[in-house]
Structures are given as C-alpha cells and as structure tokens.
C-alpha cells in the first residue's frame, strides 16, 4: 500500500502541471520505477481516474484531462502565505537513503515556517516541462539520483529561482550551491582498516556509473594500489553496470561469493558500496554458504544513520542522512541571509560505525581435526 500511495502522489504532482492531453508514463515504466506489479499500478491509475485527473482511451493510452495547471496553482495558494517557498525536485526512483534525506529536509523547512512543494520528475525533459507551468520560488532543491543534469535543465531551474541547491557533490563550478560528500576518504579508511587486520587481499565493489563522489573514491583506491607494498594486496576494482537496486545487490552477492571461494587460504576483505539492505545481504551470503567474517570480511560504504543498511552487524564507513539534510537546510538559510555570498560545495563529515563483519587481526582459524582413524 505504501508503494501505491507514493505512486499516486507522484502522478498527482504530474497532474498539477500537465497540459491537456499530456500522456502519462507507461505502465511498464511505473512498474519498474516504483517496484510494483501491474495490478498495483492499475489501482493507482484507477484512483486518479475517479478523481477526474486522468482519462483512458482504448488503443490510444492514458492522458491527463487538463486544467491541472490551475489545480497546482490553487494548491500553492492554499499554502500558508507567510514564509518563503521552496520547491523540492526529485526522481521517484531515488534510493531509500536519498528519499530519507529529502523527507527530513522537507520537515525542517516546514518546521521553520516556510512552504514546500515536492515535485517528481522522470527525466530531464519531463523536469523542464514541469517547471514551465510553475511559479517562481524562493529556492529550489534538486536531487538528481546519480544522473547528469543537462545545461537546459539547469537553465530551467534558474528561471524558477535565484537560489538553486543541489543535493550531492556532482555539480560544482556553476552559480548553484551543492551539499554532498565524496568516497575517497571512506575508501582510504576502509583499506587501512582491512590492511591493519592482516587481510592479504582487498577488493572494492562499486558501480561503473560515473558520478563525482564515486569517481573520487575510485581515484583514491587506484592511487593506493600504486603505493608500495599495496600493488598486490589491492585487487582491481569490481565495477558493476547497475546502480543501487535488487539487481545491483544480487550482482554484489555473486561477486562476494566468488571472492570468498577463491583458493589459497589468504585472509580476504571487501569494500562494498551501494547496499541498501544489510539483512538481504546477510541472508544471501548465508544461502550461499559464505560465513562473515570467517570466510570474508566486509566493510560497507553507506549511510551511518540508516540502520537498514548495516543491520546492526556490518562495519560501515560513510555519511549521515540527517547531517546531509541539516547541511542542505543550513545552506538554504545561509543563501537567503546573504544572496551575494560566493557559491560553493559543502562536504559533510565522514563517520565510522563498528560492526562484526570484519575479522580481527588476532583471529586464528580453527585447526582442522586430524584424521586418526
């Protein structure tokens, strides 16, 4: 029910700015983005149809009925007139940790007496269409979820607000503010932790998709591989083609199992980025007969305050979702108080949460029982 509710909210946000006859996203794309089966998507569509927001035509598709731009304007007029207005622009397919950051930011803005309007978008072209029919805002916060922002989309944002803040360290050197982090320091800390623990082989599993924070992590790892004596200790990074998802986690599991089963008996440790569910990861490893940390030590790179990621078990190095939201809000307030201040990037603090997934240096493998028969 929660996923269906999120889909309904997303479609309603589209309806507030859609022009008469605009086509809805396909059922297949909605199933993929919201991780719903077809009946769940159909239930959400039926609810919008009963509200008079969409209409279906056999053989042609499903369309917004029109008049929705005024509906969006009315929604804005019904908001309290005191305070400033902030548009929160995000993709519905964002990760759990990304949604958590924006939800907390929205609560902070509201608690401060200001107004928010959350708008979902499917891609850059759709974002530009959505923005065209919206009024100007005192600020815009955008969360792009690993994808590049075309220049045209940035220009559309600037037309709607003088104050644009990006959630993530992936757009710098322009007249926008950005708040984020980079994976270079966590990667270095994890490598040193595993190395001090006597792990002869260290692996790094992450995504092949290029974005600034991840590229900095890979850059630091490759630098450390060139430093003696780590040339043979640090293995070539494993770059998986997908972004955080069930498909990504399955690929991580298969790679971890393969590493744990490598012959030789050396102590092996792995840095893993992008895991959203520590419980699924543990269950998957157990199902494959892999013991953590006896067979393989694991350090997760993720959110230090999202318990679902580490499941009170995994050693985790990364950043706090709460601090990310607080830094976004602080940058927002700072920009309002001093509009002429230089634009820049704010990097939040790295945290480490100890867990039981790393084999201690003093551990000795139990001796195999001798065959005296």
Image (cartoon, helix red, strand yellow):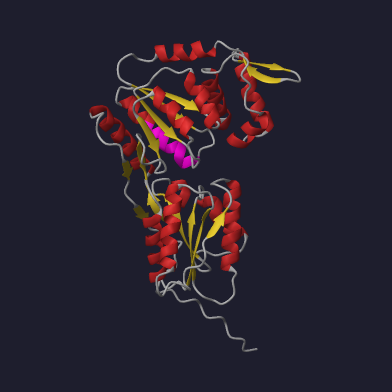
- Magenta-colored segment: predominant secondary structure: helix
Residue 328 x %, y %: 34, 36
Q: Kindly give the residue lying farthest to the right in the view shown.
A: 59
- The question of residue 237 being in magenta is answered with no
Is residue 35 something that shows in the picture?
no
Q: Residue drawn 37% across and 29% down?
A: 107
- The question of residue 104 being in magenta is answered with yes
Q: Quadrant of the C terminus?
A: bottom right
Residue 363 x %, y %: 43, 73
Name the side, left or right, on which 64 lies relative to 107.
right
Name the side, left or right, on which 319 lies relative to 112.
right
Q: Residue drawn 64% across and 29% down?
A: 40
Is residue 37 something that shows in the picture?
yes
Residue 158 vertical position relative to residue 274 in the rendered view, above or below? above
Q: Quadrant of the N terminus?
A: top right
Where residue 313 sits, quadrant-wise, is: bottom left
Residue 107 vertical position relative to residue 74 in the rendered view, above or below? below
Q: Kindly give the residue lying farthest to the bottom in the view shown.
A: 372
Q: Which residues are magenta?
A: 95-105
Where residue 122 sits, quadrant-wise, is: top right
Pick the residue in front: 76 or 304: 76
Where residue 24 sits, quadrant-wise, is: top right
Q: How many discs mark residues in the rendered view?
A: 0
Residue 134 x %, y %: 45, 18
Pick the residue in front: 353 or 244: 244
Residue 340 vertical position relative to residue 327 in the rendered view, above or below? above
Residue 146 x %, y %: 49, 42
Pick the residue in front: 35 or 236: 236
Q: Residue drawn 40% across and 22% down?
A: 160
Q: Residue drawn 58% across and 48% down?
A: 242
Residue 301 vertical position relative to residue 296 in the rendered view, above or below? above
């Amino acid at each position: 029910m929660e996923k269906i509710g999120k889909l309904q909210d997303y479609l309603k946000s589209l309806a507030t700015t859609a022009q008469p006859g605009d086509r809805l996203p396909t059922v297949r794309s909605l199933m993929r983005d919201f991780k719903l089966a077809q009946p769940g998507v159909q239930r959400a569509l039926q609810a919008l149809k009963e509200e008079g927001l969409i209409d279906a035509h056999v053989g042609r598709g499903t369309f917004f009925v029109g008049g929705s731009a005024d509906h969006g304007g009315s929604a804005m007029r019904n908001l309290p007139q005191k305070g400033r207005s902030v548009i929160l622009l995000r993709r519905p397919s964002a990760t759990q940790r990304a949604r958590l950051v924006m939800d907390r930011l929205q609560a902070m803005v509201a608690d401060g007496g200001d107004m928010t309007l959350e708008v979902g978008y499917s891609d850059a072209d759709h974002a530009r269409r959505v923005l065209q029919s919206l009024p100007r805002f005192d600020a815009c916060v955008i969360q792009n979820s690993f994808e590049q922002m075309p220049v045209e989309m940035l220009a559309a944002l600037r037309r709607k607000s003088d104050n644009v803040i990006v959630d993530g360290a992936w757009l710098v050197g322009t007249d926008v503010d950005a708040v984020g982090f980079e994976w270079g320091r966590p990667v270095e800390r994890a490598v040193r932790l595993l190395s001090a623990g006597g792990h002869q082989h260290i692996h790094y599993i992450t995504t092949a998709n290029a974005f600034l924070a991840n590229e900095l992590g890979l850059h630091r790892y490759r630098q450390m591989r060139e430093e003696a004596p780590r040339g043979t200790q640090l293995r070539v990074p494993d770059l998986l083609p997908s972004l955080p998802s069930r498909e990504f986690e399955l690929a991580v599991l298969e790679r971890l199992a393969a590493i744990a089963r490598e012959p030789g008996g050396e102590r092996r440790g792995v840095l893993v980025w992008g895991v959203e569910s520590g419980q699924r990861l543990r269950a998957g490893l157990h199902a494959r007969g892999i013991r953590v940390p006896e067979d393989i030590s694991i350090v997760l790179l993720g959110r230090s305050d999202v318990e679902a990621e580490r499941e009170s078990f995994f050693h985790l190095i990364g950043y706090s979702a709460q601090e990310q939201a607080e830094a976004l809000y602080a940058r927002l307030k700072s920009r309002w108080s001093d509009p002429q201040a230089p634009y820049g990037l704010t990097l939040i603090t790295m945290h480490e949460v100890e867990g039981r997934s790393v084999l201690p240096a003093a551990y000795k493998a139990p001796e195999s029982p001798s065959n005296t028969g």
